[in-house]
Amino acid sequence: GDSVTQMEGPVTLSEEAFLTINCTYTATGYPSLFWYVQYPGEGLQLLLKATKADDKGSNKGFEATYRKETTSFHLEKGSVQVSDSAVYFCALSQSGGSYIPTFGRGTSLIVHP
Amino acid sequence: KAGVTQTPRYLIKTRGQQVTLSCSPISGHRSVSWYQQTPGQGLQFLFEYFSETQRNKGNFPGRFSGRQFSNSRSEMNVSTLELGDSALYLCASSLQGGSEKLFFGSGTQLSVL
C-alpha cells in the first residue's frame, strides 16, 4: 500500500537558519502531495500542496518540489522564525473520492531565538 | 466562512464509560473523517463518512463508531473506554474527499483515568 516516510524529529534550529524536512513516499500512480502544519493546541492546516511531477508548492516562505524520480517532497524554508515552531506532516492522496490520505508520522520543529 | 468545529474541546472520563464527540464540518462539505492522534502512534485514521454513509474504516475495534447526519455534522462514539483511548481526536472535512485538501478542527482532547 501507499506510505509516507518523514525524518524523525525533533529538528532544533536557531532563528534565521535554513530548514529542510525530508519526506519520501511509496505509491502507485500519480498521487497529490501535501505538507500540513500543526501548531500547539490546534488541528492540522494545509501548508502547501503539489499535484504533479516537478510542481513546486509554496506558502509563507516554505517550498516543496514534487520529485517523481526520487519519490520525494522535501520541505524547505530559507530562514525560519520562532513562530514556525510546530509539527509538520507530509501526506499523499490519490484521486478518487473514496481514497483516504496517507500521513507521515510528523516532524517536530523547534526554533530558538 | 466558519471552520470545522469540534466539541467539546476537553473531556475527562474514567475507564468503562462511554463518550460522544461532535464535529461540524465547513458548510457544503460532505466528507467528514476522524483521526486519533497520540505521541506514540501519530495520526491514525478512524473512519470517513460521506453523505451519511460510512465510506472508509480504519483498523480500530468496534468500540469506536460514528455517524453522519443529513446536515453533514458527524459524531463519533467510544464505548467501554480504556486508558489507551486517551488521545487527541481530530475531525477533518472536505467537499468530496480523495485528493482534496482536508480542513481540520482543533480536536477534542480525551483523557481516560
Image (cartoon, grey):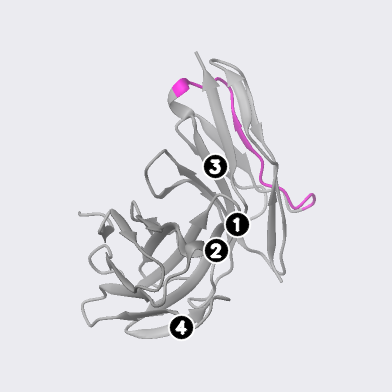
Q: Which amino acid does label 1 sit on?
A: Gln
Q: Residue at x 66, y 31 (%)?
A: A20
* Residue bearing the label numbered 2: B44
Element at label 3: strand
Measured in 3D between alpha carbons, the distance from the residue under mark 3 to the one under mark 2, in whole angstroms, is: 15 Å
Mark 4 secondary-structure assignment? strand
Q: Give the residue type at disc 4.
A: Arg
Residue A38, x across and y down, in percent: 45, 43
- Front label number (3 vs 1): 1
Query: Which residue is at a point 60% across and 21% down the rendered structure image?
Result: A13
For mark 1, name the chain: B
Foreground label between 2 and 4 = 2
Q: Residue furthest right?
A: A69
Q: In the picture, residue B15 is in which quadrant?
A: bottom left
- Between residues A25 and A31, which one lies in front from this camera angle? A25
- Image location of residue B22, percent across then percent down: 27, 67
**Is B40 displayed left or right of B96 in the figure?**
right
Magenta span has B97?
Answer: no
Residue in front for this viewpoint, A104 or A9: A9
Can see residue B31? Answer: yes
Do discs 4 and 3 share a chain?
no
Residue that carries the numbered disc 3 in the rendered image: A88
For disc 2, the neighbor class at 10 Å (few under 14, some 14 to 19, many from 20) is some
Q: Give the range drawn in magenta.
A: A69-82
Answer few, some or many: residues within 10 Å of disc 3's Cα (few below 14, many 20 plus, some between 14 and 19): many
Amino acid type at circle 3 is Tyr
Q: Residue B55 carries which label?
A: 4
Identify the main secondary structure in magenta: loop
